[in-house]
Image (spheres, rainbow, N blue to C red):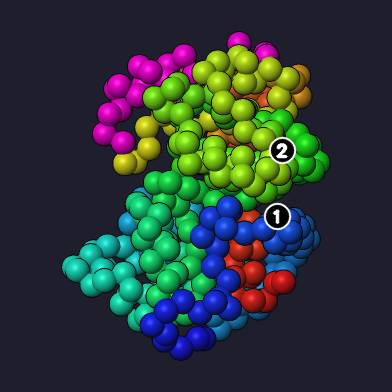
Amino acid sequence: MSGDNNSANTGVRHFLDIDRLDGATLRRLLDHAVRIKADLKKDRLAHSTLLAGRSLALIFEKPSTRTRVSFEVGMQQFGGNVVVLKPDDMQLGRGETIGDTARVLSRFVDAVMVRTTGEERVHELATHASIPIINGLTDQTHPCQIMADLMTFEEHRGPINGRTVAWIGDCNNVAVSWAHAAVRFGFEMRLACPTVYGPSPELLAWAEREGTGRLVVTESPEEAVRGVECVITDAWASMHNTDVDERAAILAPYQVNEALMAHAHPDALFMHCLPAHRNEEVTDGVIDGRHSVVWDEAENRLHAQKAILGWCMGVLD
């Protein structure tokens, strides 16, 4: 375990955002996830000592089902330990600085996963920690989810490089991380969003500057899904949104239903990070239908995050 430093240890492997890692590293993480899943299916005790003696702190400033269970079970399957922290459990909730919290946790545990509000909170933890920090979700991005999504696509359709996928709805944190992935993995991402909920100029400028993927922005769901190999959506209101009714009214034309899926490739996949608000952003017929891979997608959170844990703690290359 690393000691306490006043500033970031540049040798520490953080998993903060997809855009902060290069394509080769991200590809290795996906390859590790695939192997980890295959080994687990053959032997439930595969890799059961990989992180023996290591501890992971899980900080939840937002509610969680998939993130908590997948990280906790994943760490246990690697033979490690987990401590779960919520705001009421921590001095952080009573005014201790993020930097001081990072310094203290660096003395106790081997890595921290944090699910929080602002992206800056994750980055401040990483600045002051001498152990890996993993972004489990912020209001701006959700990189762990997208690693599982990419793994799911490739399980069903092969390499995602050069493919075309469509996002339908508002350009939320999941969509932003998908856009980062499009650039890093070299595929086309079509974003069908009402103008008021469209991608930020900063995101589009970053994608243009990086130049290895392609983002296409449109207000038309039908145009976005035409011929694509994967259709993705998410709930219309995130945990931090207060304008729920207004958002629902604006996003109603962006429901992913059977009629919309008919414009996609006949074998197109449907993804949703869950939880789904059935018959709002997606109909029962789609989420339970032949295109849907949402349950594989949810399961792959476990395997993708185990790969991230192993890489961050230096036991996987």
Query: Taking 150 as reference, is 238 left or right?
Result: left
Q: Position of residue 299 (x, y in %)?
A: 61, 48
Query: Taking 60 as reference, is 10 left or right?
Result: right
Q: Quadrant of the C terminus?
A: bottom right
Task: Give the residue at x 31% y 62%.
Answer: 86
Q: Position of residue 122 (x, y in %)?
A: 41, 61
Task: Give the residue at x 71% y 24%.
Answer: 228
The residue that disc 1 covers is: 23
Task: Give the residue at x 42% y 28%.
Answer: 197
Q: Earlier in the sequence, mark 1 or mark 2?
A: 1
Amino acid found under the numbered disc labelled 2: Phe
Amino acid found under the numbered disc labelled 1: Gly
Looking at the rendered structure, the secondary structure element under dot 1 is helix
Is residue 254 on the magenta stretch? yes
The residue that disc 2 covers is: 187
Q: Quadrant of residue 150?
A: top right
Task: Give the residue at x 46% y 36%.
Answer: 200
The region drawn magenta spans 241-263
